[in-house]
Image: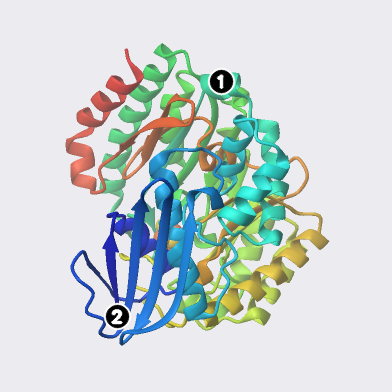
Amino acid sequence: MFKFYLSGHDFEYEVQNALRVFDLNADIEISYGSFEGRGLSLVSCLEEGEIIRARAQLYKDRELLSEACFKADDIILEKYGDKKLKKTLVIKTIHHVLKSYYKVEPDYGILTGVRVVKILIIAKRENKSGEEINRILRDTYEVKEEKIKLLWDILSIEEKYIDEKINKSNYNLYIDIPFCPSKCIYCSFTSYVNCPQKKINSYLDTLSFEIEKTIELAKKKKLNLNTIYVGGGTPSVLNEDQINKLFEPIIKHYDLSQVREITFEAGRPDTLNKEKLLCLKRNKVDRISINPQTMNDDTLRAIGRKHLSSEIVDAYYMAREAGFTTINMDIILGLPGEDESDVRRTMEIIGGLNPENITVHTLAYKKLSELTRESSEFYKDYDLIKKMHAAIDELCQGKGYKPYYMYRQKNIKGNSENIGYTKDGRECIYNMVMTEELETILGCGLGASSKIITGENKHETIRNFKSLEEYEMRIDEIINKKQSLLGG
Ligand code: SF4
C-alpha cells in the first residue's frame, strides 16, 4: 500500500496513473493531511511562487529513500498551458522517485495517455521543429530513443492522411455488432454469446434505423463518407441475409464501390464460410480481419476460443479464394502461459501467410474481463513484453511490414503499446484517422462512440447505450444527441 500526501495540488487521477506505470496492482491511499510516515509514503508538493516547482519524496517508515524536484524551466511542452505544466511537473517528480524504487526505466517515460503520435502532430501544427519535438519527448516526457524513432516512423506514414481541409469535411462510419460465438477471458467489450436469432434480428432493425438517420444527418452537414468499419463483437456471426440488411441503409445513400475503404471484422474462423465471404464481397467489403491472437492451440483453448489454429489458416485461404486482397490478422502479446518462443512461432506462421496488415496488441487487464493479473511484479512483465515486441518487430520488418499506427491502453502488460504493421500502401485508413482523432467518427450500434470534430484538436463525444434493451428502447435519444451536435 502506498500512501500519497498531496499539497499544493489535487491531481489525484494523474498521481494514480503515475503509480500504475510501475505497478498495476498497488493499493493507494491519498491524503491531504499531515505526514504520518508509516509504511511506504510519497509526499508530492507543488509550489507556486515566483517559480513554479514540484517536489516528490519517497519514504519507507520515515526513512527517505529518494527525492526529486523539477521547476517550470526544466520542461518544454508541445502545448503550453498552466494546468498542463503543473500536472507534468508533479507527474515527473513522482515518476522519478518511483523509478528509483522499482528500478525500471519505462519506455514511454511519464506518458500514460492513449495517443502518443498525436503529441508529434500537435507540436508540428504549432511549428515546432523536429529537434524541439524530440527534446519534448526525450527530456520532458522521458521517452526512450527507440520509441521516439518508432513514433516518427509511424507519423511518416500517417502524414499522407493528414490534410486539415479534407479531414474536416470527412466522416467515417463505425458499426458495432455485439455478438460472439464464445467469450474470450480477456474481453471487456459488450458482447452477447450465442444470442438467439430473434434478438439479433431485432437489434438489426434498430441498428438499420440508427445508420439511416446518422447518414441523413451527416449528409445535411455536408460531410463526405470516407470509410466504413464494422467491428464488435464478431460481426461475422451474422448470416448472409443479416449482412445484406446491415448494408441496406448505406446503399440507399451511397454507391459502396466509391467508399474508400470498408472493413469487416471476421475475427473468428468458426464463423466463416465461403458464402458469407462472397456476400461480404458483393457488399464491397475490401478489408477483413481474421484474428488468430495466437497460433498455439493450448492457449486458444485457455483463452476461451472454440477453434483450432489450423482453422485460422483454412479461413485465411478461403478469404483469399473469395477475392479479399487486404487481410488483417491480430495477435496478442502476453497471453497467459506464453513466452517469447510462442510469440515467435505465432508470428512465423502468420508471416508465412503474408497478410497485408498485422496488428500486434499487448494484453491489457480490464476490470470487466475474467482474466486476473498473474504478476504484480512490473519488471517481469516489462522484460517479457519487451522481448516479445523486439522479436515481432524483427520478424515484421524482415518481411517488409512497417509500423503505421499505435496506441496505448491503461493497465497494459509491461506498460507497453499496440502497434499496427502494414505492407507498403496497404494501411487501414480508418485505424489512423480514428486513433489520431483526425476525422469525425459516427458510431452506430450498441456501445458505439461517436467523435464529432468541432475545431482544431477539439471534439464532442456521444456514447451509445451498452445494454441491448436500453439501446433499442432509447434509440431516439441517441439520434437526438447526434442531431444536436451535427445540426439539422
Ligand atoms: S471475439 Fe472480441 S468481442 Fe468477442 S469475446 Fe473475444 S475479445 Fe470479446
Q: Residue at x 54, y 40 (%)?
A: 436
Is residue 401 in sight in this rendering? Answer: yes
Q: Residue at x 61, y 33 (%)?
A: 261
In the picture, residue 5 is in which quadrant? bottom left
In the picture, residue 380 is in which quadrant? bottom right
Q: Which one is in front, 202 or 11?
A: 11
Please tell me the numbered disc located at residue 1. 2
Please tell me the numbered disc located at residue 404. none
In what element is the residue under mark 1? loop
Q: Which one is in front, 472 or 60?
A: 60
Give the color scheme: rainbow, by chain, secondary structure or one colour.
Answer: rainbow
Is residue 325 in sight in this rendering? Answer: no
In this rendering, the label closer to the viewer, 1 or 2: 2
As drawn, 399 above or below 280: below
Could you tell me which quadrant the C terminus lies in? top left
Could you tell me which quadrant the N terminus lies in? bottom left
